[in-house]
Structure formats: C-alpha cells, structure tokens
Image (tube, helix red, strand yellow):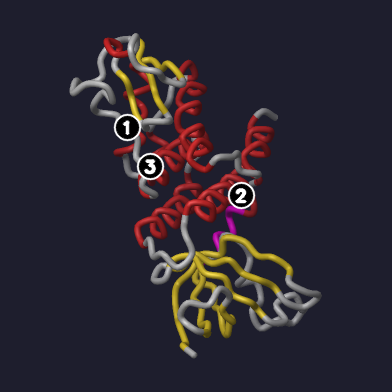
C-alpha cells in the first residue's frame, strides 16, 4: 500500500453516497487520478472547500500503484481561484477548460506541461476581457499538447507554404491545404488567409498576453470553426459545457 503526495487541480467531483465524494484530480506528478474522499459531503468535513472544482491543491492519498480509485487522506488549498467564481462567463470558461482536460488526459499518464498550461489559463482569466480569444488559444494549444497539433506551416498535399486568399482545412488529416491543391484534395472547410495567420499567432503567443491579440470580428466565427471543431472532431462529440458558454456569450 503506497502513500503519495502531489499537487493537483480538481477537475470535478461526483457524489458517491450521502457522505462521500469521488474527486477526479489532475496531478502534476501522476496525471489524472480518482480519489474517494470519505465524509467529504459532511458540513464539518476535514477536506473543507479543497475539493471545489478548479481549486489548486496539495493532496496526500494512498492505495496500490495501479488501482482505479485511491483513498484521499489529506488536502490543502494552494490557490482557490476565487475570482473565477465572481464572474459567470469566466467561471464557465474555466469549467470548459477543465472538461476539455478531463476528456483529453488519460488516467495515470503524467502530462506536466498540460498541467502547467491549465494553471496558466486560470491565471490568464483573471485579467483578460478577451474571453473568445482565450478560448480559441486554449483549444488549439491543448490539442497540440495532446498530440493533435494541426499542420499550419506546410500544405498537407504538397511541400509548399500555404498561400492564396482561399485555403482549405482538413480535420481528418489535421492541417491546411494550399489554394493550388484545393481542387484535388478533399477538405471539410475553406478558410481565408487571415484566419491562418491568426491560428499561427494563437499557437505561438504567451497565454498571459492573449488579451493583446485583437481578432477581427469578420474572422471570429471562422477561427472558432477551426479550433473548436478540431476539439470536437478528435473527441468525437461536443462537450456539455460549451453550448452553455455560447448561450451566455450571446446575452
């Protein structure tokens, strides 16, 4: 029976009984894990508010190395990101980021770069007013970190740099098709050259500076059609939190 300590982000919790919870945690050292938290639903629980989704915590848990559900022994809040709960749009954007991570990260597979990126995204939410830009940046970058990086600098069908006013994007092949190859290559959507330029910027820029990137209104929908569809195509479904985010954005 091993005893483990780790830093973790609370992705979500599930009620197991009238008193117990199951916490799905993304740890820096061990990847995604599940922990049973005994008596976590009681008013005077020893876990307090540490198991609130989005919280950055330190945990001690125990169990056999390969078991499916560990037992949570102790947790302390490192950072609660309380400001996220004071703004509905930012809160549900963070919930969407959590849901994305929960669906992309495999249990027991460490991904410290993705872990740090999720923390950086929560921090970026504090200061930005450009939530749509941040969502697009998070989508394309987390897909890249998960092994689904789109090819943007070279045509999928030839060795050329994608050029032309009208280009293609293939989710099946994962990248851009140049104007010259569009006639002979099947793509799911067409995109403008300006959209490709902004996709490249989203891939390269520091997430903390995303508020500096002003995406033209004329390109917003097209960029979303690439980054968000890249997510849903590779996951095979739409995430539950996203339609709610879109509904809030339209109010």
| Element assignment for label 2 | helix
**Marks 2 and 3, how far apart at CA:** 26 Å
In the rendered view, tell whether residue 44 sits above or below residue 202: below
Helix, strand or loop for disc 1: helix
Establish if 19 lies above or below 222.
Answer: below
Q: Secondary structure at mark 3?
A: loop
The outermost residue toward the right is: 18
Extent of the magenta region: 79-84
User: Does residue 245 lie above or below 72 as drawn?
Assistant: above
Which residue appears at 81% of the width and 75% of the height? 18
Q: Which residue is mark 3?
A: 148
Which label number is shown at residue 201? 1
Mark 1 or 2, nearer chain start: 2
Please give the name of the residue rendered at 66% of the width and 28% of the height, measured from the top-left corner.
250
The residue to which callout 2 is attached is 91
Mark pair 3, 1: CA separation: 17 Å
């Amino acid at each position: 029976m091993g005893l483990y300590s780790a830093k973790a982000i609370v992705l979500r919790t599930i009620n197991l009984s009238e008193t117990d919870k199951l916490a799905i945690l993304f740890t820096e050292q061990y990847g995604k894990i599940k922990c049973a938290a005994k008596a976590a639903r009681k008013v005077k629980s020893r876990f307090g508010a540490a198991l609130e989704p989005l919280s950055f915590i330190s945990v001690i848990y125990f169990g056999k190395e390969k078991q499916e559900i560990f037992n949570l022994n102790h947790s302390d809040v490192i950072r609660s990101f309380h400001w996220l709960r004071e703004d509905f749009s930012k809160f549900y954007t963070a919930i969407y980021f959590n849901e994305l991570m929960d669906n992309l990260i495999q249990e027991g597979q460490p991904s410290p770069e993705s872990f740090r990126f999720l923390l950086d995204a929560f921090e970026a939410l504090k200061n930005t007013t450009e939530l749509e830009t941040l969502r697009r940046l998070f989508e394309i970058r987390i897909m890249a970190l998960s092994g689904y990086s789109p090819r943007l600098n070279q045509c999928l069908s030839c060795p050329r740099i994608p050029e032309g006013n009208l280009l293609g994007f293939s989710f099946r092949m994962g990248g851009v098709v140049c104007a010259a190859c569009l006639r002979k290559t099947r793509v799911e959507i067409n995109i403008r050259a300006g959209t490709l330029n902004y996709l490249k910027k989203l891939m390269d820029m520091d997430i903390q500076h995303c508020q500096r990137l002003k995406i033209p209104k004329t390109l917003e929908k097209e960029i979303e059609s690439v980054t968000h569809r890249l997510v849903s195509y590779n996951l095979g479904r739409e995430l539950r939190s996203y339609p709610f985010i879109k509904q809030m954005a339209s109010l």
